[in-house]
Image (spheres, rainbow, N blue to C red):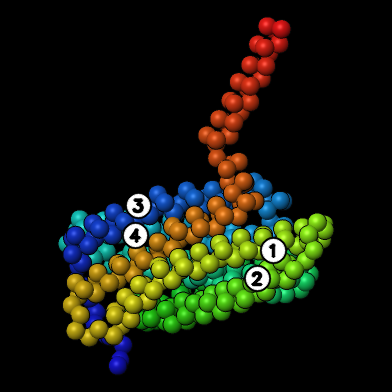
Amino acid sequence: MALSEKDCSAIPPPISLSFFTTAVSAILIFFTVPPNFLICWAVCRERRKLLRNAFNCLVVNLAFADLVVGLIVLTISAYVHLLEALTTHPVLFVLPVVHVAYFICCTASTLSLTAMAVDRYIAVVYPVAYRNKITPRRAAFVSTCIWLVSILLPVSVYFEIGFIKYAFVFANTTIAATVIILFFSYIALYRKLRAQFQRSSQLQSGMNSETAIKKALEHERRIAKTFALVLVAFFISYTPSCVFIYILNFCQSCSCVTIHWFRDLQYISIWVNSTLNPFLYSWRIPSLKEAILAGIPFKRRRTENQVTDGQELTRVNERKK
């Protein structure tokens, strides 16, 4: 079956669809930008403490990619789809900007998840090699490579084959590779952690070495659980998108209205992943959670007020005495 060649660019989408996508984009901006911004800001404030860990560097890279999705992709999307709803013709001159930004950020986000999966796999399966070789500097180098690949691929290929065909390429390369790596990394993590827990339960109690081992295993288990949640969220978000992409490419009898609906729905399903990611990992990694809460302005002012009130109460009690 050949890829679909149907061109619906000259046919405007339904007004209801344009308003729907505009509303969803605006809502997702609200839930995507603040949490990812707080992660990036907290790490910038506590970079000497948090960026000593290579995994945290990859987490920040993912948060930055999702932040760009919220600030640029979702903002432009809301603007474009609002214009589609208010005018009688498609906004053709802005669509390439939306598409390229969309593919760049989604590629960076998925590749960041892949790098995080590989990082956790090495940390659990080869802990000695991980401590000696996986450094924050190398994690930063990997993050830089991720952004270079994410920028070069869409810019060099998208303008040659168009949105629908590039979406097909994206689904069968970046998304497929990420799914395979995430799946096998999680299976390896699960087996290794289960074996480690069985060995640790056989150690004699009361020993300092046992306590240290149990703490290390608990830390790895917490991160593995977080990674499992990220994996589930990835499948929930990207599976519908891939289904829509395949329909867009292979449905010869689909009307332009149907194509417009599937186009927007595959956007939305992937954007949801950028909204879910910060809630899945930032609140489950204690060091990140503490840094984020410490950086929230109103919480900091409330804490300062509580300290001031406590000091004033102490002075009053001393005067009474």
Among the 4 quarters of the image, the one containing residue 130: bottom right
Numbered disc in front, either 2 or 3: 2
The residue beneath circle 2 is 193
Q: Residues within 10 Å of mark 3 (few under 14, many from 20)?
A: few
Q: What's the CA distance linking mark 2 and mark 3? A: 39 Å
Q: Amino acid at mark 1?
A: Leu
Q: Is residue 108 visible?
A: no
Image coordinates for residue 59, horizontal then vertical, percent: 59, 60
Dot 2 or dot 4: first in sequence order is 4
Q: Amino acid at mark 2?
A: Leu
Residue shown at 36%/72% (left/top)?
Answer: 241
As helix, strand or loop, the secondary structure at mark 3 comes to helix
Dot 1 or dot 4: first in sequence order is 4
Q: What's the CA distance linking mark 3 and mark 4? A: 12 Å
Question: Residue 27 bears which disc, if any?
Answer: 3
As helix, strand or loop, the secondary structure at mark 2 comes to helix
Are dots 2 and 1 in contact, CB under 8 Å? yes
